[in-house]
Image (cartoon, rainbow, N blue to C red):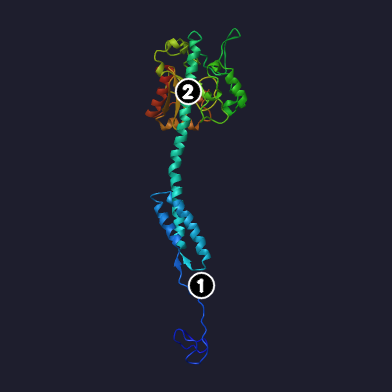
């Protein structure tokens, strides 16, 4: 103990300075004189933060302890240390949480897309069943596949289309009818009495505002063209004409409202309508026996062309194109064979 008057050192517990005789004063120690210690909660937060690398849930506790320990350190007036431990206990679980999100997002996206694909396939099966029921109740005749256009003879309609005109004249430039108008057209179609739910006429992943995303292909009482209606087993007007119903495509998901039918050449190696790219890199289809399939396009040129198209329907011959790669030709021939039953070249 030192004398505040003369500075002489005195024995511990002395009341009077041995040098100058002045009374000694005991000075209480301030916070700066106390040896700081590491906050236990900060250490616990640090440990739990590291453990979150192998077991993520404990990181949540580490974050809470880290925040609490930082508050305690701030209020301790320097008596507590360990802010670095607390910060690590917070940052590591947060980084692990972000990493988990990054890893899970693709899986969640795939699961969501798989769910939509499953619904789409179910819709297509129901559409094919309605198509089959129509033929059963109409002397084996296949329904008019040309959407929105009835067939006339001497000015009188003799074949109502499977769905009414739910597309506008300016569809090529992005025109779209009001949703209620589209639904009314669907309900006016020949298949409505066999499939009376508008949601079944569209894929859940279809373009917004498009109430129908399924089309029937040319070959099943659609637009024949170039005398194909006289080719046995290629252009079909009755179900009994189908020799292999499990291989003949009826409906195809194009993801948007298009007029008439989905068209594909029979006798040349060219695409007419664009390849629909749906549910990843392919499309979904249903067949004359009632089953549905998910097809994947093999060629990059097929998916690139389909994704770049603003409309699947291509009425202008100048827009029709021939694939250049082996895989691209395989994609085209697969859809041609499914539509026409065989390839005409």
Horizontally, residue 167 falls left or right of residue 231, namely right
Q: Which residue is mark 2?
A: 124
Horizontally, residue 17 falls left or right of residue 50, namely right
Please state which of residues 83 and 147 is positioned toward the viewer in this rendering: 83
Horizontally, residue 53 falls left or right of residue 135, namely left
State the count of labels.
2
Mark 2: secondary structure: helix
Quadrant that contains the C terminus: top left
Please state which of residues 118 and 179 is positioned toward the viewer in this rendering: 118
Q: Position of residue 239 (x, y in %)?
A: 45, 12
Labels 1 and 2 touching (C-beta < 8 A): no
Q: Position of residue 67 (x, y in %)?
A: 50, 57
Q: Earlier in the sequence, mark 1 or mark 2?
A: 1
Q: Which residue is mark 1?
A: 31
Mark 1: secondary structure: helix
Please state which of residues 267 and 34 is positioned toward the viewer in this rendering: 34
For label 2, count other residues whose C-alpha is less than 10 Å away and answer few (under 14), some (14-19) or many (20+): many
Label 1, label 2: how far apart the Cα atoms are = 78 Å
The answer to whether residue 7 is above or below residue 114 is below
Q: Quadrant of residue 296?
A: top left
């Amino acid at each position: 103990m030192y004398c505040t008057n003369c500075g002489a050192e005195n024995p511990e517990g002395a009341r009077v300075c041995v040098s100058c005789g002045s009374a000694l004063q005991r000075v209480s120690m301030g916070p700066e004189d106390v040896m700081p210690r590491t906050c236990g909660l900060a250490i616990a937060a640090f440990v739990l933060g590291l453990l979150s690398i192998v077991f993520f849930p404990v990181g949540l506790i580490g974050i809470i302890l880290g925040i609490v320990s930082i508050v305690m350190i701030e209020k301790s007036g320097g008596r507590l240390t360990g802010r670095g431990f607390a910060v690590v206990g917070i940052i590591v679980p947060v980084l692990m949480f972000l990493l988990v999100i990054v890893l899970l997002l693709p899986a969640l996206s795939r699961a969501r897309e798989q769910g939509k694909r499953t619904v789409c396939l179910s819709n297509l099966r129901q559409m094919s069943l309605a198509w089959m029921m129509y033929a059963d109740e109409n002397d084996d005749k296949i329904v008019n596949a040309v959407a929105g256009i009835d067939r006339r003879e001497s000015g009188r309609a003799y074949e109502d289309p499977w769905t009414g005109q739910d597309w506008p004249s300016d569809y090529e430039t992005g025109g779209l009818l009001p949703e209620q108008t589209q639904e009314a057209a669907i309900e006016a179609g020949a298949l409505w009495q066999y499939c009376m739910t508008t949601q079944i006429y569209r894929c859940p992943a279809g373009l917004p505002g498009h109430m129908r995303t399924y089309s029937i292909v040319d070959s099943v009482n659609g637009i024949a063209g170039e005398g194909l209606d006289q080719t046995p087993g290629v252009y079909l007007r009755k179900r009994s004409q189908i020799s292999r119903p499990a291989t003949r495509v009826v409906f195809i998901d194009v993801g948007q409202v298009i007029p008439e039918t989905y068209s594909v050449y029979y006798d040349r190696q060219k695409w007419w309508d664009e390849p629909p790219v749906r549910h990843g890199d392919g499309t979904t289809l249903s067949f004359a026996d009632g089953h549905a399939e998910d097809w994947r396009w093999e060629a990059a040129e097929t998916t690139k062309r389909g994704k770049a198209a603003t409309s699947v329907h291509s009425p202008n011959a100048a827009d029709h194109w021939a694939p250049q790669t082996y895989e691209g030709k395989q994609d085209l021939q697969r859809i041609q064979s499914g539509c026409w039953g065989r390839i005409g070249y």
